[in-house]
Amino acid sequence: MLRSLYSGISGLRAHQTMLDATGNNISNVNTTGFKSSSVQFQDTLSQITQGATGPDADRGGSNPAQVGLGVQVAGISTNFTQGSSQNTGRATDMMISGDGFFVTRSGNTTGLTRAGAFDFDANGRLVSPDGGLVQGWMAGPNGQLAAGGEVTDITLPNNLVAPGRASSQAAVSGNLPKDTAVGQSLVRDAQVFAADGSESTLTLEFTRTGTGWRVDGTHGGSGATATQNLAENANGALAAGGPLTVGGVAVDLAALTGFTGLNTASIEGVDGNAAGTLEGFSLGSDGSLTGSFSNGVQQVVAQIAIGNVTNPAGLSKAGGSSYTLTGNSGELQLGTAGSPGFGSVAGGMLEMSNVDLSQEFTNLIVAQRGFQANARIITTSDELLQELSNLKR
């Protein structure tokens, strides 16, 4: 049987594979985070019809004569170049700008994906469209992160609570009027918090003395009191001997002045807060999720992990726009967005497919013409075989 017949068949199969890959690329032109594939060909073994001979003193050498036996697919590679960004405005849509993948878990299987169209399930877990649980690190009660440890499911339940924090400092600024009569008092109040989130009133009473002012502080929650004197000079400056500590709250009096005619003293800069529940969150470029709580506190609640491998082309496509590790991809390396070797994360955006339609339609023409040419080889070989059959009539 003619060798060209089988060469033509191998060409048909190879160009059919190229057509399949190109069709898959075009069908996923609008798939979030999709990476296009391309097919590489290589020739098969060649049949030697005449071996090579070396030269000698009386005769030159000759080259081998070989006839190829067709083509085969050498490999199908994935193009991991960055896709364009699409602004969605959804807080749970995320995009990696640079290298790396989001890490998900489905049972005991770890997946990697560039498609950041996430959402929350009924249990408050951040999930991919196919139900994969997004991995990262959860923050402690006070917003501290332990990035670099064991990853876990990112969970933001609606009833997540930011604990209360006791007030520890405050400051008084403004002016106490120098022309106030001796013995007359000015009162300033501010809300302070205990460790359990309960509120109480911090009261400061400024009483005019012959040499300046006396400050009497009262902590409404604990009932603690404290007193301190402010000495004045002719230039309107007031000198405090340090902060006034009332019930664990250190009140800084250094910014007070004592000029005539201005009554602007006020308490500000009080820290601490009551307990609050989660109302929303925002995503930082380092993958941190900062929650906004009903008490006005903004606190880090979690950080999304970014994974990478030494050879991304060695990953295996697992469907659902995700990949799994193989023996040639390298081990999974976990890190935070923006650190060396890992891209940054943008919220409210998605990475679009990197399929180039102009290139894919060109590949369609190449695959079609290659297929037609190899089909012509088969029909030509068939005509030759028909001619041989007609030798005997």
Image (cartoon, grey):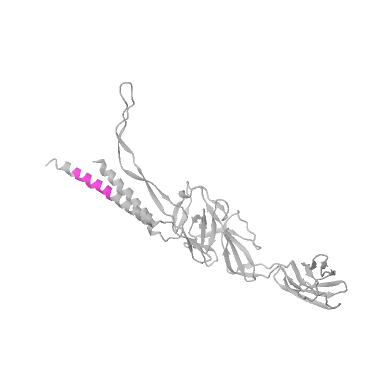
Quadrant in the picture for residue 218: bottom right
Towards the viewer: 96 or 5: 96
Towards the viewer: 321 or 210: 210
Residue at 62% x, 69% y is 293
- Residues rendered magenta in the picture: 372-385
* Quarter of the figure with the N terminus: top left
Residue at 38% x, 49% y is 39
Residue that lies at the very extreme toward the left in this rendered image: 393
Horizontal and vertical percent position of residue 328: 47, 46
Quadrant in the picture for residue 180: bottom right
Q: Is residue 373 magenta?
A: yes
Q: Left or right of 115: which side holds 278?
A: right
Residue 352 visible (yes or no) = yes
Towards the viewer: 287 or 200: 287
Q: Left or right of 324: which side holds 298?
A: right
Main SS type for the magenta part? helix
Towards the viewer: 208 or 143: 208
Q: Is residue 347 magenta?
A: no
Q: Compared with residue 263, is residue 335 higher up or lower down, i.e. above or below?
A: above
Q: Compared with residue 243, is residue 8 higher up or lower down, i.e. above or below?
A: above
Residue 247 visible (yes or no) = no
* Quarter of the figure with the C terminus: top left
Q: Compared with residue 99, is residue 244 higher up or lower down, i.e. above or below?
A: below
Q: Left or right of 171: which side holds 322?
A: left
Horizontal and vertical percent position of residue 258: 81, 72
Horizontal and vertical percent position of residue 298: 63, 66
Quadrant in the picture for residue 63: top left
